[in-house]
Amino acid sequence: MSVMKDLSRGIIRDNAVFRLVLGLCPTLAVTGTAENGLGMGLSATAVLVCSNLVVAALRNVIPNKIRIPCFIVIIATFVTMVDMLLNAFLPALHAQLGIFVPLIVVNCVILGRAEAFASRNPVLNSAADGIGIGLGFTLALTTLGAVRELLSKGTIFHANILGSGYQPFQVFGFPPGAFIALGLMLALFNMLSRKFRLE
Amino acid sequence: MGNIIVIIFGAIFINNFVLSRFLGLCPYFGVSKKVETSIGMGMAVTFVMTMASLVTWLLEWFVLVPNNLQYLRTIVFILVIAALVQFVEIVMRKVAPALYEALGIFLPLITTNCAVLGVAILNIQIGYNLFEALVFAVAAAAGFTLALVILAGIRERLELAFISRHFRGVALSLIIAGILSIAFMGFQGMM
């Protein structure tokens, strides 16, 4: 039962981006389109699940004093693997995400989950937590990407939504639009979570 | 020489690390409540970024490339940065305890500041030589500090303003950063 709880908690209630405001760099940088947001979210989820698994399995072996460097090495290993796999099988996406693929290693969501959850919980729960938080992160990135793509190009996942007469809101494709779109979405999420009493 | 000037202006204004490259956002929104703290944070980041660039550049070209070990880059770089941050932390606790207290949790978090790892990786990807890499690191850190101090100044004034409760905190800071980013986009016409 608690495994299901660990899984579902991260998706909305403890959403990494909207509720905890972590992992902002990739959130803003790669969400020009919904596709890139989804790709980044899934890559980060893969790393998060694997690193949570390994950290939880080794939690009684890793000495407390040097646990952070140990976590970082574990995370960096999986990031390198994801980097190589993306480069081999999805080169177009790899080029789009650019420097933010190796930078998954410093995504505070992943190190945060290793420290706060996986280092003191059993393997199964940690994996569930990784999947939940990862899905929440993916959801946030894809939503933000979809909103920005819709406003800046009138499309979502390259499918034309607003018709050819749409006058694009170009700024949402550029860096300022990322900040403003996320700011407005955070305010909306704050409002909704007050209304439905999530806290 | 012209090349160096282009690197400096590019890193501070045109491709500002925070406002246009989206690197180092966690400390950007985390320690921008007071101008004083933000200057301290900027100095700490400048020091770590410059040292990290120096060490990682040397490691890349004298250890990783000759041995064909480039695939270990991410792991090696992040370990070097973690060690450096630990070192800065120890020195700062001894030399400037007040600043150490003020920076609090964000000092160890420089390790996970993507601006530091970002500058190290960009140095290699763009193919700068050692001098260019160091100039780039200092300029990028200066750009980070500039953006941080501007946001801190604005947020200090907002303390007294009435803000809709849904926008309080990070939501409003993000929108302010967006407006700053529009202002910085104006520099793109310079080159």
Image (spheres, rainbow, N blue to C red):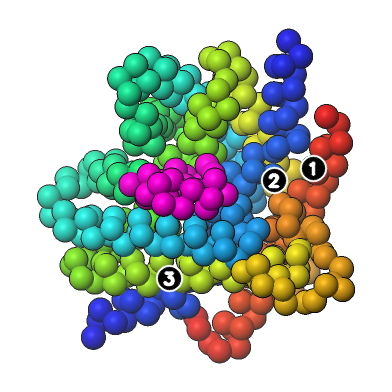
Q: Residue at label 3?
A: A135
> Residue at 16% of width from left, 58% of height from top?
A57
> Residue at 38% of width from left, 14% of height from top?
B62
> Residue at 71% of width from left, 51% of height from top?
A175
Which residue type carries mark 3? Leu
Which residue type carries mark 2? Leu
The answer to whether one can see residue A196 in this image is: yes
Q: Which mark is residue B184?
A: 1
Residue placed furthest toward the left: A61
| Residue A132 x, y percent position in the rendering | 37, 72
**Marked residue chain, label 3:** A
Residue placed furthest toward the top: B1
Which residue type carries mark 1? Phe
Magenta segment boundaries in residue numbering: A81-107
Q: Residue at label 2?
A: B19
The numbered mark, 1 or 2, whose residue comes first in the sequence reads 2
Marks 1 & 2, CB-CB < 8 Å contact: yes
